[in-house]
Amino acid sequence: MQAKPFLKEIQIKREMVPSFDAYPFHIPSIRGLSSLKFHPDVTFIIGENGSGKSTLIEAIALHMGFSTEGGSKNAQFQTHNNSSRLFNYLTSIKSFKKPNDYFFLRAESYYNLATYMENAYESEKDRDTFERQYGVRSLHECSHGESFMATLTNRLTGNGLYIFDEPEAALSPNRQMAALSLINTLVNENSQFIIATHSPILLAYPGATIYQLDDSGIKQVRYEETEHYMVTKHFLNNYTEMTRILFGD
């Protein structure tokens, strides 16, 4: 019997939903969702802005015991009460074995997480502990991208369940490729990832399950079928023509 995937599947308790005409259940991708199965290694959730991918990834994270703004399960804090109630209507199927490590990395609230960590590790002894965990003395003394990479490289210890929401937001293309390599290292160390992303670089992870959210609901697609791959490839192969069209020349 295999331990992974740690999180096998989430299901919506549809009979308990008060109305599918109210947020967030009126979002087409959520309205038609009954269950979602996860790959043992990497599952991607993709879609246009407003398609519901961050709403869904947030609900999965909250259901698993993370705070809205990310971090480990011990980082229970909240600066804004703006999460949807979707997580209250989720149930899940999990592995017989729990992961040793958990982390929710959310780009839009990472600054708040870094601030929380700074305040939680105030003493010199605490700072030494923090540096051993993250590889840096202060996340705020790094650039956004450097602090992301410090977390990926040092804080995530393997044999873990890691949920990411648009991690590419702070990363250059080179750093996205480095992150892809780190994800693979952690997968080889018995970890599972669930990632909402716009990045065609991250989406290239071999063998990953990719779910596309749109007005028709949720469907599984191949990498080459994603708009991220097709649009990026077409633009790079035809950038002169594309910029001319975009500028109306």
Image (cartoon, rainbow, N blue to C red):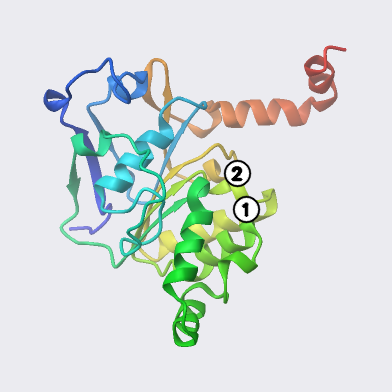
Judge whether 14 appears above or below 87 on screen: above
Q: Residue at x 51, y 43 (%)?
A: 166
The reply to whether residue 184 is in sight is no
Quarter of the image with the C terminus is top right
Q: What percent of the width, then of the height, locates residue 153?
A: 53, 67
Q: Is residue 58 above or below residue 172?
A: above
Q: How dense is the environment of label 2, judged by Cα within 10 Å: few (below 14), some, or many (20 and up)?
A: some
Where 72 sits versus 137, above or below?
Answer: above
Residue of label 2: 201
Vertical relation: 216 (above or below) 132: above
Q: Residue furthest right?
A: 249
From the viewer's side, name the closer residue of 227 and 133.
133
Quadrant position of the N terminus in the picture: bottom left
Q: Is residue 201 visible?
A: yes
**Residue 76: percent from the left, percent from the top?**
32, 59
What residue sits right under mark 1 in the picture?
A: 177
Position of 150 with respect to 7 (left or right) is right
Label at residue 249: none
Instruction: Tell me which residue sits at (35%, 18%) in the image.
Output: 28
| In the image, farthest residue toward the bottom | 125
Q: Position of residue 5 (x, y in %)?
A: 28, 52
Q: Looking at the image, which residue is at 53% across and 55% down?
A: 111
Q: Is label 1 in a helix, a strand or a loop?
A: helix
- The amino acid pointed to by label 2 is Ile
Q: Which residue appears farthest toward the top when viewing the image?
A: 248
Instruction: Name which residue type carries label 1.
Output: Met
Q: Which quadrant would residue 233 be assigned to in this image?
A: top right
- Where residue 81 appears, x then y in whole percent? 35, 42
Q: Are marks 1 and 2 in contact (CB under 8 Å)?
A: yes
Residue drawn 58% across and 47% down? 168
